[in-house]
Amino acid sequence: MTALVYALKTMGRAKSITFWSVAFPLVLATLFYMAFADIDKAGLARPVSIVVVDDAAYRAAPGLAETIEASHTGEDPWLDVEYVQTETAAEQLVGDGGYYGYVKAESSGQLEYHRDWRDYTGYDPGHEIATALLDSYLRNAAFAASHPGAAMQQPANFTKSVQLTAQAPSDQVRYFYSVLGFAVVMGCNFAMFGVSGLRSGRSQIGARVALGGVARYRVLAPTVAAAYILTLVTLIIGFLYIRFVLQIAFGGRDWEILAILAVGAMATTALGAALATVPLPAAALAGLSAAIACLLSLFAGLYGPGSQLLADQVAQSAPWFTWFNPAREIYDALFSLYCYDTFDQAAVAMGKLALLALALFAVAAWAMRRVRHAHL
């Protein structure tokens, strides 16, 4: 217990480790929130702004006012309507810009849509929406006129909204999955710093440990345990910040996400312990860990749509590569948890992380066992 407490204090007081493992992922998450806060709204259809001449002919047209009213009310309106009394006022508004055109009903029963060709040239879905709604009205009006006594029919609904995933697809959450994957890999700095200090060539304490009569595992085990605790705490802090401060919804499965991060912390702790056995100076090891985190995050989609496309292509063509990438496995586990009702796919990713952790712990234990003062 004494060794565990000492390791916690030593690693927790390392300012550079604390910054890169705790502060930097929080800053990165904040920047992503500022950059991609409205990304999910970018592809949504916006109401088409038109002007309607609300005169006697418009009110006399059977069902026209009801059709226009129904099209710009409700939760997802198709039209954004501005009513005017005269055609001159409608021409003035459209001429000033900001409207696709104006609708004018004639006393003869005709309906005209005057399109603004200056600002909306070529194909524009806004014009398609407006003309489709007006054409639907004209068909219904013609049917009602040819069948006296028949009421205006509502357009038939030929489609039905179907959601194939457990949660609504979101491009925004993908970036935060990648941020959590990056934070997991950066957490290796705790184990790398702690285990590296046990090597006799790195510090005076390491030299004393190598020359002392205490078994190596009695010092290594509490150091690794302390690194795991600190890594897990930093990941929980990062998740809580994203979840409750930035208010990014992860599908309401917070406990499952914490379980995934717990396994990820184990994998990155093993990675840090293995990196600590590399015969490099401490500063070089810190740069190596940062480079590894940035490289692995490239294949977890951290750097934008291009990175996400590359990561998906690599995962499809070389799925074995994800076994060696904790950032990608964290991303896959969180993404499957968001999309699927069951925990099966996430459990597979967690199993891969656990196997990777065991392999890296074995490498670190073997390398540390070979380190003796006589070999230096």
Image (tube, rainbow, N blue to C red):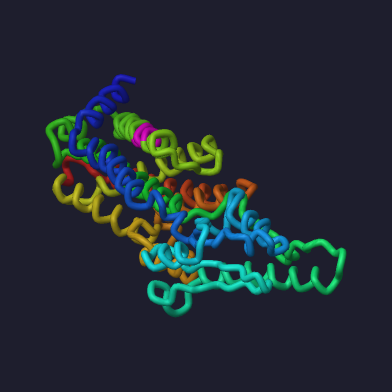
Image quadrant in which you'd find residue 301: bottom left
* Residue 338 drawn at (x, y percent): 55, 48
User: Is 35 or 156 nearer to us in this picture?
Assistant: 156
Looking at the image, which residue is at 31% across and 40% down? 26
Residue at figure coordinates x 53%, y 49% from the top left: 351
Q: Position of residue 173 (x, y in %)?
A: 45, 50
Residue 243 showing in the rendered view: yes
Q: Quadrant of the N terminus?
A: top left
Which residue: 26% across, 42% down?
24
Q: Is residue 56 above or below residue 357?
A: below
Query: Visible in this render: residue 80?
Result: no
Left or right: 232 in relation to 114:
left
Q: Residue at x 51, y 73 (%)?
A: 114
First to last magenta residue range: 231-237
Depicted 206 relative to depicted 66: above or below: above
The rendered magenta stretch, by its main secondary structure, is classed as helix
Residue 278: image x %, image y %?
23, 51
State the residue in front, 178 or 292: 178
